[in-house]
Amino acid sequence: MGNGDTNDVARALWFTGPRTAELREEALRPPGPGEILVRGIVSLVSPGTEMSVYRGQVENPPEGDPAAAAKLYLPTADGQFPFPVKFAYQIVGEVEQVGEHSKYSVGDRVFSYYPHQNRFVIADDASLVFRVPAHLDSERAAFANLFCVAYNALLDCPVRIGDCVAVSGLGIIGSFAAHLARRTASRLVLVDPLPQRRARANWIGGDAVVHPDQAAEAIADLTGGRGVDIYIEASGAPPALQGAIDATGQEGTIVVISYYGNREATLRLSPEFHVRRQRIVSSQVGSVGSGLQPRWDAARRMGVAMEELASFDVKQLISHRVPFADAPLAYEQIDARPDESLGVLLQY
């Protein structure tokens, strides 16, 4: 609500210029048929794609239709790329009102693919809104999308028992991917340039946790010179993709779950990529790929994420809790001090 005394005004976070975020008031209408009105409880800042949008590191919008690019990535986005744009996608809230024919009830908790906003109306579409189980607290549920991003990579490229795996980028997504890979990998190498992130990742149980400059040697030592079977690139740093190619073995797979935005990735493909017959796989959470669609959809994947998070200690991934009124300051913190920032929750 705008000033806390009206029911028809909401407050939403917008990116209005490079590295500039602000809260704006918006009119709030009642929910129509098949829609729900949600009051935000907690939302999670995505340190990858969302921060790229905040910094203005997104692709140039299509000629003549700058709003289409934002909608392409997120149907609940508003505005246009590069700015001004309302763009985020992981908020947990409580249903306050329901429209006709809605499958939700007042009081239900839901996870929504919606930008940071204290109250909002959203279609109760099965690809946008998911019921939060009673046994799952709201902070854990806020991590459900980023868990899905990591889990999607393992649906695209399963880690077999005995595989040697490397993960670059120990943010939230990379940490989740490494956590899942650890269950079956015989060797796991974790790679990040930031010392605090490497220290935070001790809970995962990597066989080596190293700076990118040390990754090639660590992988060679742990794999007997073969290189890894699977290299998960989750850092968002274009040079990391070259490191993945160099350290992946014969007919190995590089799974890219990073969003590079408008940053160019210049690669040297010879000899490693060609001679070793490597595969580079794009794993994007917008769809479940690899021929799994007959059995898997967004709802099933989200159900697995919530089951896993119910017993997962997210405190090891939370670095800051920030009141929604101070949300612009949270982005300044993440941008200026990435080594100190991991999971940043906005509390409503």
Image (tube, rainbow, N blue to C red):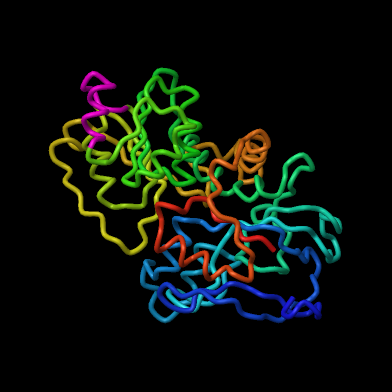
Is the residue 171 above or below the residue 85 in the image? Answer: above
Q: What's the magenta region?
A: 214-228
User: Looking at the picture, how far across and down is residue 306, in whole percent?
Assistant: 66, 40
Secondary structure mainly formed by the magenta segment: helix
The single residue placed furthest to the left in the displayed view is: 271
Residue 4: x and y, percent? 77, 77
Residues 195 and 10: in front is 195
Query: What is the quadrant of residue 41 in the picture?
Result: bottom right
Q: Is residue 203 above or below residue 332?
A: above
The image shows a total of numbered marks equal to: 0
Indicate whether 105 appears above or below 279.
below
Locate residue 89, reporting x and y percent: 58, 59
Residue 28: in magenta span: no
Q: Is residue 115 left or right of residue 200?
A: right
Q: Residue at x 83, y 66 (%)?
A: 99
Q: State which quadrant residue 217 falls in.
A: top left
The quadrant the C terminus occupies is bottom right
Image quadrant where one finds the N terminus: bottom right
| 220 inside magenta stretch | yes
Q: Is residue 150 left or right of residue 278?
A: right
Q: Residue at x 53, y 71 (%)?
A: 328
Instruction: Identify the image quadrant of residue 123.
Output: bottom right
Horizontal arrangement in the rendering, residue 151 relative to residue 299 (left or right): left
The residue at 59%/76% (across/down) is 23
